[in-house]
Image (spheres, rainbow, N blue to C red):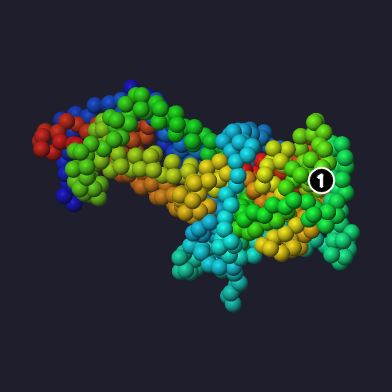
């Protein structure tokens, strides 16, 4: 309540005095271009990845898949029940009825036994071969773009200036968490602490982990770098980590969208399309200055 | 300026709306990619060549697939595809315990061969405990015993212009109006001569079971399961496979899977 009143007050002040924050050039063309290439790539990688997962909708821990023993952590399937077919999802031994979405989906007249539903896969029908073609193409695009971004950002200072959290940032973390929780956003040239941690986490942890676990599933790469699968706990564990990392990236995407909507979608979209970002108007009370 | 702002805003709104419509309407929008002859799909397939070249570069000719211990053999080898061929030729060979079965080695060789199972078993053998990775995503560890393929190729004296080994199989994998399709597949001579590429007649210390490809299957340990045909009866050395099947080098390749199954 207090924060909303504060924001309202701030907006009214700005309107009354006729001041708007100045436009600053926030995102270089490298950041904007790579951002959108990733957005497109991740869209196709996710939906083709779910297609690939559907070919064997179970995840395991270890070197191999347990058929005569049990080492699964996630199983999605369908089976007949007295009341008709049901879709189920078993996570760490806990079984959930997921009819309609996971395991069994489609119309009531034409139920379709498949792990992820048709609307979540590319192509919509069961087609592992096409899923693989799409997945590996965009895996190259994603990896190449990550490399280009890394080099460009190291040279243009984006890494050091914008992404590396400073001691001050970390000290400011509790306050930043509290600000986000109250949807109280400061619009400034610099990323706030949570932004730095979230973007850095995606670019330096999740995406590289995605690539490494993807390579660890390749029998050819297992011959080239045998320690890779072992390091990750075996090929099937690598596959499970690949899936969990996917879920984390989807989680990031959802929060990313919510934050953009909450912080002002036009301004946020403008900065990642044109580079220009409108900052908060200058504060009258210096103690309220944004970090 | 305000006009420009409005246009930009409208553009952004439209872009966002169309993006979300795309996401919400499901992915029927990309079903054209499933068409094997679609131009966009063929562009995307170009990445498979890059993948193949980079894997060959990184894995080299000789790098070995990981081998495991007896303790890792925890279950029977999971069979896939055809597990009980119902072809009359196969069934009659099977009823005679494959005594009348022969492995033909033909094509671009100086000395075509016709080998019995016993002749193959009399050749030097290799036993390896390896992980079978299926294109579907699962893995299973088993012990395989067979004759290194390089020895068979040497016995047949491969001609210098040969580039690929094609495996012809006894099992019919598809029956349709256009006829019957027997399983077949191909690898190049780099993989054919790889030290772990064996023509396997034994599995987990026993004769190779029917469901896993008796009397003979190939193990190509640096590739996925669909590259290791079962129920082999003929090995043909060729300089190209464009005239076979649908021209892509194998039953699954003809149906859109990559020829190099290294990932």
The image quadrant that residue B207 belongs to is bottom right
**Residue A213 appears in the rendering:** yes
Query: Where B14 sits versus A184, above or below?
Result: above
From the viewer's perspective, tell me whether residue A289 is left or right of residue B140: left
x, y percent for residue A143: 49, 36
**Judging from the image, what secondary structure is the residue with disc 1 in?**
strand
The C terminus of chain A appears in which quarter of the rendering?
top left
Residue at image location 52% in from the left, 42% down from the top: A225
**Residue B227 appears in the rendering:** no
From the viewer's perspective, tell me whether residue B74 is left or right of residue A8: right
x, y percent for residue A146: 44, 34
x, y percent for residue A12: 18, 38
Q: Name the residue under label 1.
A: B235
Please state which of residues A144 and A39 is positioned toward the viewer in this rendering.
Answer: A144
Spot the residue most to the top. Answer: B1
**Label 1 crowd (10 A; few <14 / some 14-19 / many >=20):** many
Please state which of residues B5 and B143 is positioned toward the viewer in this rendering.
Answer: B143
Q: Mark 1 lies on which chain?
A: B
Residue at image location 63% in from the left, 59% down from the top: B142
Please state which of residues B261 and A153 is positioned toward the viewer in this rendering.
Answer: B261
Please state which of residues B121 and A256 is positioned toward the viewer in this rendering.
Answer: B121
Query: Where A155 sits versus B73, above or below?
Result: above
The image quadrant that residue A27 belongs to is top left
x, y percent for residue B122: 80, 54
């Amino acid at each position: 309540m207090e924060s909303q009143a504060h924001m309202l007050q701030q907006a009214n002040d700005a309107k009354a005095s006729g001041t708007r924050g100045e436009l600053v050039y926030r995102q270089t063309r490298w950041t904007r271009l790579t951002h959108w290439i990733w957005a497109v790539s991740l869209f196709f990688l996710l939906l083709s990845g779910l297609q690939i997962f559907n070919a064997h909708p179970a995840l395991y821990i270890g070197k191999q898949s347990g058929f005569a023993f049990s080492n699964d952590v996630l199983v999605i399937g369908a089976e007949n029940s007295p009341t008709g077919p049901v879709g189920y999802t078993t996570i760490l031994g806990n079984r959930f009825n997921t009819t309609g979405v996971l395991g069994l989906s489609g119309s009531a007249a034409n139920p379709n036994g498949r792990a992820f539903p048709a609307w979540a896969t590319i192509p919509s029908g069961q087609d592992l071969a096409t899923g693989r073609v799409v997945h590996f193409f965009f895996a190259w695009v994603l990896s190449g773009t990550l490399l280009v971004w890394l080099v460009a950002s190291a040279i243009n200072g984006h890494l050091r200036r914008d992404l590396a959290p400073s001691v001050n940032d970390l000290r400011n973390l509790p306050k930043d968490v509290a600000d986000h929780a109250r949807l109280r956003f400061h619009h400034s040239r610099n990323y706030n602490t949570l932004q730095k941690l979230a973007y850095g986490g995606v670019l330096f942890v999740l995406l590289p982990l995605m690539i490494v676990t993807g390579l660890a599933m390749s029998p050819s790469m297992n011959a080239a770098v045998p320690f890779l699968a072992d390091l990750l706990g075996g090929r099937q564990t690598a596959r499970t980590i690949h899936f969990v990392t996917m879920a984390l990236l989807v989680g990031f995407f959802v929060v990313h969208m919510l934050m953009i909507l909450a912080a002002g979608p036009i301004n946020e979209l403008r900065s990642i399309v044109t580079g220009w970002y409108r900052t908060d108007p200058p504060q009258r009370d210096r103690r309220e200055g944004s970090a | 300026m305000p006009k420009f702002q409005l246009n930009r805003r409208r553009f952004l709104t439209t872009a966002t709306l169309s993006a979300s419509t795309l996401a919400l309407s499901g992915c029927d929008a990309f079903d054209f990619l499933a068409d094997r002859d679609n131009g966009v799909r063929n562009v995307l397939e170009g990445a498979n060549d890059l993948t193949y070249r980079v894997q060959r570069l990184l894995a080299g000719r000789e790098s070995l697939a990981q081998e495991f211990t007896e303790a890792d053999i925890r279950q029977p080898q999971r069979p896939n595809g055809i597990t009980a061929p119902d072809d009359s030729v196969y069934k009659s060979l099977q009823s005679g315990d494959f005594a009348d079965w022969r492995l033909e080695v033909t094509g671009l060789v100086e000395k075509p061969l016709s080998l019995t199972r016993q002749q193959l078993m009399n050749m030097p053998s290799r036993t390896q405990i390896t992980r079978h990775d299926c294109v579907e995503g699962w893995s299973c560890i088993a012990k395989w015993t067979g004759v290194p393929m390089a020895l068979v190729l040497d016995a047949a004296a491969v001609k210098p212009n040969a580039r690929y080994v094609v495996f012809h199989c006894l099992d019919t994998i598809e029956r349709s109006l256009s006829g019957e399709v027997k399983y077949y597949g191909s690898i190049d001579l780099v993989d054919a001569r790889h030290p772990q590429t064996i023509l396997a007649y034994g599995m987990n210390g026993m004769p190779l079971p029917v469901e896993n490809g008796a009397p003979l299957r190939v193990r190509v340990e640096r590739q996925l399961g669909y590259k290791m045909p079962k129920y082999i009866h003929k090995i043909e050395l060729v300089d190209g496979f464009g005239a076979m099947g649908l021209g892509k080098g194998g039953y699954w390749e003809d149906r859109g899977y990559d020829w190099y199954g290294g990932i």
